[in-house]
Image (cartoon, rainbow, N blue to C red):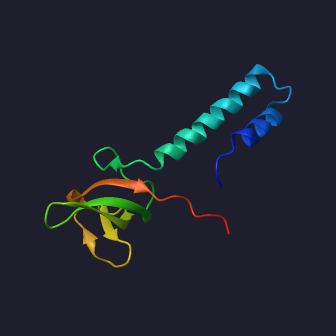
């Protein structure tokens, strides 16, 4: 799906209709919040700042390898520890080797 500004303007006009200024402001704030959350979902988050929410969260992680270079891995964050492990096996990653993580995009509807 691609962005279609003309279509979005028609939808916005229909949603607003004869809305009061308060309802229009609420709709605008809700739209801005969705845009912020969508943008934030695709940012690298330092592990020093926070960890993923929930146990067994599947995320992308920047992992420092044996040569000292970062690489991107699909990992599972476990609340016990905190531990990180590769998605495909039970090999645990030392906590200090994971520097950043990013949420995975949501699954497309089936």
- At a point 32% along the width and 78% down the height, the residue shown is 90
Q: Position of residue 3 (x, y in %)?
A: 65, 46
- At a point 78% along the width and 40% down the height, the residue shown is 11
Q: Is residue 68 left or right of residue 99?
A: left
Quarter of the image for residue 74 reads bottom left
**Which corner quadrant holds the C terminus?**
bottom right
Give 92 or 65, whichever is nearer the viewer: 65
Quarter of the image for residue 98 reads bottom left
Residue farthest along the right direction in this orientation: 18
Give 99 or 1, whichever is nearer the viewer: 1
Q: Is residue 3 left or right of residue 22?
A: left
Q: Is residue 68 left or right of residue 59?
A: left
Q: Position of residue 33 (x, y in %)?
A: 58, 37
Q: Position of residue 63 (x, y in %)?
A: 26, 61
Q: Position of residue 60 (x, y in %)?
A: 38, 61
Residue farthest along the top direction in this orientation: 21
**Which corner quadrant holds the N terminus?**
bottom right
Relative to residue 62, is residue 46 depicted above or below? above
- At a point 82% along the width and 26% down the height, the residue shown is 19
Relative to residue 34, is residue 54 depicted above or below? below
Residue farthest along the left direction in this orientation: 67
Give 11 or 87, whichever is nearer the viewer: 11
- At a point 47% along the width and 44% down the height, the residue shown is 40
């Amino acid at each position: 799906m691609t962005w279609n500004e003309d279509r979005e303007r028609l939808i916005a006009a229909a949603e607003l209709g004869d809305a009061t200024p308060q309802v229009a402001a609420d709709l605008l704030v809700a739209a801005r919040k969705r845009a912020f959350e969508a943008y934030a979902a695709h940012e690298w988050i330092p592990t020093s700042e926070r960890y993923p929410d929930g146990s067994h969260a599947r995320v992308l992680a920047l992992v420092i390898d044996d040569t000292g270079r970062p690489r991107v891995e699909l990992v599972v964050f476990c609340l016990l520890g905190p531990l990180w492990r590769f998605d495909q096996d039970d090999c645990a990653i030392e906590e200090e080797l994971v520097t950043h993580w990013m949420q995975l995009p949501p699954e497309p509807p089936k």
